[in-house]
Image (spheres, helix red, strand yellow):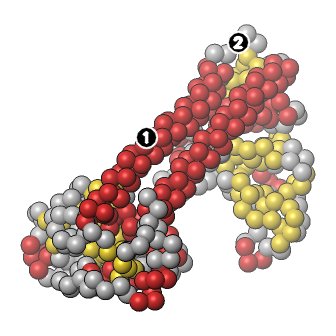
Amino acid sequence: MNVIDDRERGSAGQAQGGGMRQGWTWKPLGEVCKTGSGGTPLSSRKEFYEGGTIPWLVSGEVAQGNVLEAKNFITAAGLENSAAKLFPRDTVLVAMYGATAGQVGILRFEAATNQAVCGILPNDKFVPEFLYYFLLAKKDDLVAQATGNAQPNISQIKIKNTEVPVLPLPEQQRIVALLDEAFAGLATAKANTEQNLQNARAIFESHLQSVFSQRGEGWEETTLDKISTNLDSRRVPITKNVRSSGEYPYYGASGIVDYVADYIFEGNNLLVSEDGANLLARSTPIAFSVTGRYWVNNHAHILHFETMATQRFVQFFLESIKLDEFITGAAQPKLNQRALNAIPIPIPESVEEQARIVNEVESLQAETQRLTRLYERKLAALEELKKSLLHQAFNGEL
């Protein structure tokens, strides 16, 4: 392991240390810590995996904070016949590849990793938590330097060349204690805000359920083919390479996918997803009202209603129920027109009653959206506060 040189690093250290606490020394991480990456045993060799007892982590398992368990295991033969190596407890891990690139964690047990994880081994010059917080502060910088677009790739060289402050252990421990306390408070605030966000959405969903389950006098059960006109035959898909850009929305199964130079529909209609994983996942709406001039491809059913009250009532109803029993296809879920028309729709016979219910639901929806925006802003502010605290900590301001 390299011996730490107590001399300052010249102009580079002074540049990074501008405005920082006097006496801080900055050095490349690779000069003051031993680092390494892992490896992957050949997947074709069963003896490298079957019956394995050695924990083996992939980059996606490097979670922020303490890394406490592994999902995968390899054998001693797998360890010996690959670039994988055992990292000791308190190794600081950095994910170098994929969606979790830049994520930092502290290994709290002995484990091996794949080649997409960089390990900074513990030594007597650094508190592991200090390096953890420092690399967390550097996460955005490391990701910004990553190569690759769809899958960012941070090189181990970039991590080793990252300048790190070399401080006395008591000073490191002081900074860690301050950050631990602050981050614990932020974690509590975040958990409370996320719970409030869930509660706001749950109240709206519960109200929708009650509206359609507690049907009053004058309700009937019908189907979409009896209360709307299906305009699917007028849909025209346009492949991306032949679309002409323009001002008109081009709708697909989950909303607007592009803007084109012409339109084939005009006025108020209801679009219902015809295919796609979202029919089951329901992460975005599967029924949405559209108006104006627009184009619709063949991934969304298009329904026209005599009144907006009926259209919006049906929209809210479809959003309140599961459609699993009407959906076919495993790899590509599909809600065909026949299945769509088989969905029983409970609805008041009176359009005035439909409008009253829609107005009530829309008011609650507006309040839910207001609260959602409020809580999402608070969550964003908490994340910014974390970054600000880390910046202060490693700028010598704590």
- Under circle 2, the secondary element is loop
Q: Report whether 169 appears left or right of 306.
A: left
The vertical placement of 78 against 308, above or below, is below
The vertical placement of 61 against 195, above or below, is below
Extreme-front residue of the structure: 22
Residue plotted at (63% across, 24% down):
207
The vertical placement of 323 against 113, above or below, is above
Q: Quadrant of residue 115?
A: bottom left
Residue 75 spot, x, y in % from top left = 11, 70
Q: Amino acid at mark 2?
A: Gly
Using a 10 Å C-alpha cutoff, classify the residue at mark 1 as few (fewer than 14 neighbours), some (14 to 19) or many (20 or more).
few
Q: Pick whichever of labels 1 and 2 is earlier in the sequence.
A: 1
Q: Amino acid at mark 1?
A: Thr
Q: Is residue 59 visible?
A: no
Q: Which mark is residue 216?
A: 2
Which of pointers 1 and 2 indicates the residue nearer the eye? 1
Residue 384 spot, x, y in % from top left = 55, 56
Name the residue tied to disc 1: 188
